[in-house]
Image: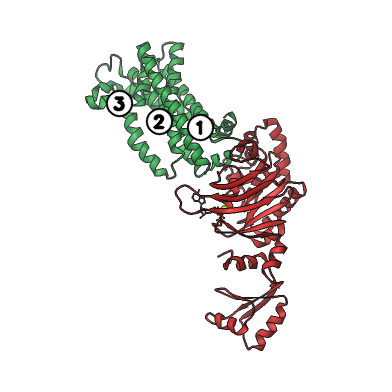
Chain colours: A green, B red
Amino acid sequence: MIRALTYWLFRYRRTWQGTVVVSVANPLLFLLAIGAGLGSLVQGDVEGVPYLQFFAPGMLAAAAFQNAFIDAGFGVATARGRERVYQTAVATPLSPGEVMGGHLLFVALRVFVGALAFVVVMACFGLVSSVSVFVTVLLAATLTGIAPAALVAAWAVTVTDFPRLNTVFRFVVMPMYLFSGTFFSVEQLPAALQTIMYALPLWHGADLCRSLALGTATPGMTLLHVAYLGAMAVAGILIGRVTFRKVLYV
Amino acid sequence: MALIEAEGLEKRYPGTDFAAVAGIGFRVERGEAFGFLGPNGAGKSSTMRMLACVSQPSGGSLRILGEDPVVHGRALRARLGVVPQDDALDLQLTVRENLIVYGLYFGLSLKRMRAKSAELLEFAQLADKAGERVEHLSGGMRRRLTIARSLVNDPEILLLDEPTTGLDPQARHILWDRLFRLKSAGVTLILTTHYMDEAEQLCDRLVIMDKGLIADEGTPRELIDRHVTREVLELRFPPGEQEQAAEKLGGDVEVLPDRLLCYADDGDEVLTRVTEVGLRPLTALVRRATLEDVFLRLTGRSLTD
Ligand SMILES: Nc1ncnc2c1ncn2[C@@H]1O[C@H](COP(=O)(O)OP(=O)(O)OP(=O)(O)O)[C@@H](O)[C@H]1O
Ligand SMILES: [Mg+2]
């Protein structure tokens, strides 16, 4: 698995500077815009805190989730399709499972670096009250990304036409991105939609990040969120082991 | 013990109703160069992928280095070198990085691979391109790099799927020369091709494949002796006159869409007869018989249509 990861690190060596700049610039712009402009349009507090404080951890979770989908979805489909990275790797002693594991580790690393940049920017805006908040929120955001990544990779390796990925991105990921309690409270949604959102992974990720950032986390809910996201990651890995083998050992 | 033994080997892909490989048997001995010659879709690559232990046979038996590839795939792949039909090099990485990463896949250390990659680049005549991105390499250079890559683990068997397809004559000759060297160093070569001259140049023994089956097997010389005469006279006539001409001439004649092939041990003798019976071909050429003629005889089709 580490052997398969090193390939991605070699490639990352070429591009990491650029991706880090984007990872910092993105939250910086959003938080500036909300803090200085949009936020003042929102009357009063949301769920008991000023809008910027509410928004930042939600956006953090949403970004981790979205980045994970892009890396695991488009990244995996390209590695299997046009670039044939996987086919090269499985001609060596590496197994399809290890090839998948290596790529997922890399996705996790990228999600982690993105979340780290985001939390550092949050700290600059005075939104991180202590080191322990910094660490727990960072880990929560990373988990929010990793959880769907394996499942997305397990599916993406079977996808040969790219437009399908775009469709899923537009009609599955974007709605989740917008409505999972990331930018506004889920409680503002109609009851039926609320129930659906509670069942989806990004709400768990966003609520986990926000409750840890605001210091409102309860052991029960935290455990529930972590268990949900952890189970999703495990399920993805188990399914991925099957789909990767099926696709790569034709 | 043969290095590779296949018996009734089959490959059916899920969702298709025909066999890409429909029951083939062959043996490859240590140190020989063994070829699969066949047209597009014959099942060459499907066979190669089974030999490379990344594709499970659908039927029959296959033993590689005495082991079952389905059970011992991982250990076997450590002892094989694979040159796939499409290079599948990483275009974003440099020439050297492509080798290093591949070596790491085999569990070799970074230090070891730094030394090894220099050695392999020397062998592939790419030393001056080491730091260049693969994107910028020509087709021939990429092919040589793929061969260099396949050698990182000092394989006992090297599997080459159409090693020279799409290369210009000079690039092909450089590549053949490298393959000769490997063979002299004791590496067993298994290659596929649809070039007869390549099969005649490189292969000690070969099988002719068509539609998933083996049509015949032997050394290039044996196959030519068995199926065709020593020489071939090629005649071209205006369209529509070929059939008549063939009838008039008689003897061992194959009618192709664009020309007649007359098999004979002495082509000039036939050519004399052509004029004697009053035929006026547009062109006439006497040449030695090749594997192409063998293929034509065995399948009734030309290899490169
Ligand atoms: N992954 C696959 N799924 C379904 N069918 C396949 C697959 N790979 C090959 N085939 C089919 O199997 C047959 C044999 O293909 P194969 O690639 O083995 O031929 P080949 O001799 O290598 O041809 P070429 O000279 O074009 O490379 C073809 O009809 C091809 O369409
Ligand atoms: Mg092929």
**Quarter placement of the C terminus of chain B:** bottom right
Q: Which residue is drawn at 51% across and 49% down?
A: B12
**Marks 1 & 3 on one chain:** yes
User: Quick one: SS at disc 2?
Assistant: helix
Say whether residue A223 is left or right of residue B216.
left
Identify the mark nearer the N-term, 2 or 3.
Answer: 2
Mark 1 belongs to which amino acid? Gly
Residue A18, labelled with which disc? Answer: 1
Q: Which tag is nearer the camera, tag 2 or tag 1?
A: 2
Residue ID for mark 2? A66
Residue B118: name its quadrant: top right
Residue position for label 3: A197
Dividing the picture into quadrants, the one containing residue A200 is: top left
CA gap, disc 1 and disc 3: 34 Å
Q: Residue at x 49, y 40 (%)?
A: A246
The answer for which chain carries disc 3 is: A
Element marked by disc 3: helix
Q: In the image, which disc is placed on residue B180? A: none
Cβ at disc 1 under 8 Å from ligand 1:
no
